[in-house]
Amino acid sequence: EIKECDWSSDVCSSDLKKSSIMKVIALVLVVLCIIGYSAGQLVRFPLIKRQRTHEQKQRSINRLLDMQQNPPQFLASNPVDALKNFDDVEYVANITIGTPPQGPFVVVMDTGSSNLWVAGVNCDDFGCKNKMKYNPAKSSSYKKNGQSISISYGTGSMTGYLDVDTVNLGKGMNVKSVTFGQAATLAPFFGNTNVDGILGLAYKAIAADGVTTVFDTMLAQGLVSKNIFSVVLNSDSMSTSSEIVFGGIDSSLYTGDITYTKITHQEYYMMEFKDVYVGSEKQHYCFLFSCSAIVDTGTSYLIGPESHVTALLKKLNVASDCSNLGQLPNIAFEIEGKQLAIKPDVYVIKENGKCTPAIAAGSGIPFWILGDTFIRSYYTIFDRASSRLGFATPAASL
């Protein structure tokens, strides 16, 4: 016979109490071990190098050529987002939002911004054309926030309001109570893109409305144990080996040593480098001082100060008919005494027998943006715990 025990009296025997207590302790230890094991694992989030139509590729090249001829104006109040061109971003990921899950939403995983937003159910303008749309009325885990949000980009803006809901990053990674933007209007530019929104991975300091970022929420909920993530990008179309690794570093994704350098500002992932090389020739862009650069997965190209990029493009002299492609030199950034090189087959876009360097200038911009052109060449580590960035040669299997 099983009797209910009154723990405030002596109804239960001492032995029974001890036995029950030991069972509870054992169960707690097992649960803690499971939680610790789960949180200690690397969380892999696949990125897809999307297949684009000929028209989309040509539009991107035309925009790049226009950027080279007419550098976009640098806006001091919003320097990185003002230069973004999300139509050219090729690496996207699928997430779901709500309970039951809505989606998948195709989003840009962007280390150059800090907000998550997706198209909303009431967005009916051209910018939301053919987009997956979030509907809070269909989610039991939705919580109202209602605060307005507006984010400006170089190609337009999004406006809407904030919601709170569960965001799923795949394989059971449910991030609860994430505050994100539901777009009510999107610039016409977004209507020509294959993305439903953006998931920002930069610091909270630059988040619109000061919302807590998705990654910070993951940390707070113990879904990852380390304040670090890493990125590897594969250049092959529709490749499934590109990914973000949340919570640590995967030694199978790189070879050789990691070159670490300090994050100088905890807003964007900004660092310093000594100079730019064309082949073995130092360009002396930085003179007596270091140059600054932002490492940004949400920018496709290398973008830099107008005077530097103009000189660099002239030095490279990439032939539009690709006739000198085999003779082009590497470009290298000197970081912590090492020259991290980018090969011509990475920094040159070849389409229909025509070649265009994936390098553009920003008018008035005082720093470089090392976008996917750079990140495709290096396994890139965003070590927020130690306030540093790391770069290593990707494994040959990638």
Image: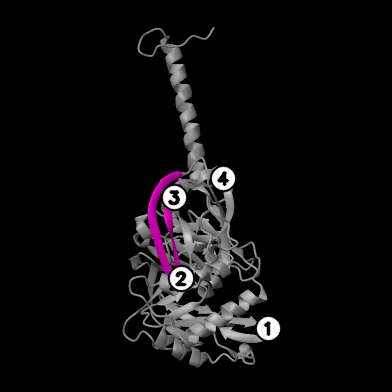
Q: Nearer the viewer, residue 137 or 289?
A: 137
What is the CA distance from the residue labelled 4 to the residue labelled 2?
Answer: 34 Å
Decide which of tag 1 and tag 3 comes sooner along the chain. 3
Assign a secondary structure to mark 1. Answer: loop
Residue at x 47% of width, y 73% of height: 155
Given the image, on which type of amino acid does mark 4 rest?
Answer: Gly
Question: Which of the image's four quarters has the N terminus?
Answer: top right
Label disc, if present, on residue 257 of the rendered structure: none
The answer to whether residue 193 is above or below residue 162 is below
Image coordinates of residue 56 in percent, x first then y, are 62, 74
Mark 4 burial class by Cα count in 10 Å: few <14, some 14-19, many 20+: few
The answer to whether residue 22 is above or below residue 384 is above
Mark 3 burial class by Cα count in 10 Å: few <14, some 14-19, many 20+: many
Q: Nearer the viewer, residue 301 or 73?
A: 73
Residues at marks 1 and 3 touching, judged by CB atoms closer than 8 Å: no
Can see residue 250?
no
Stretch in magenta: 143-164
Which residue is labeled 3 in the image?
163
State which mark lies toward you, 4 or 3: 3
Can see residue 169?
yes
Which residue is labeled 4 in the image?
172
State which mark lies toward you, 1 or 2: 2
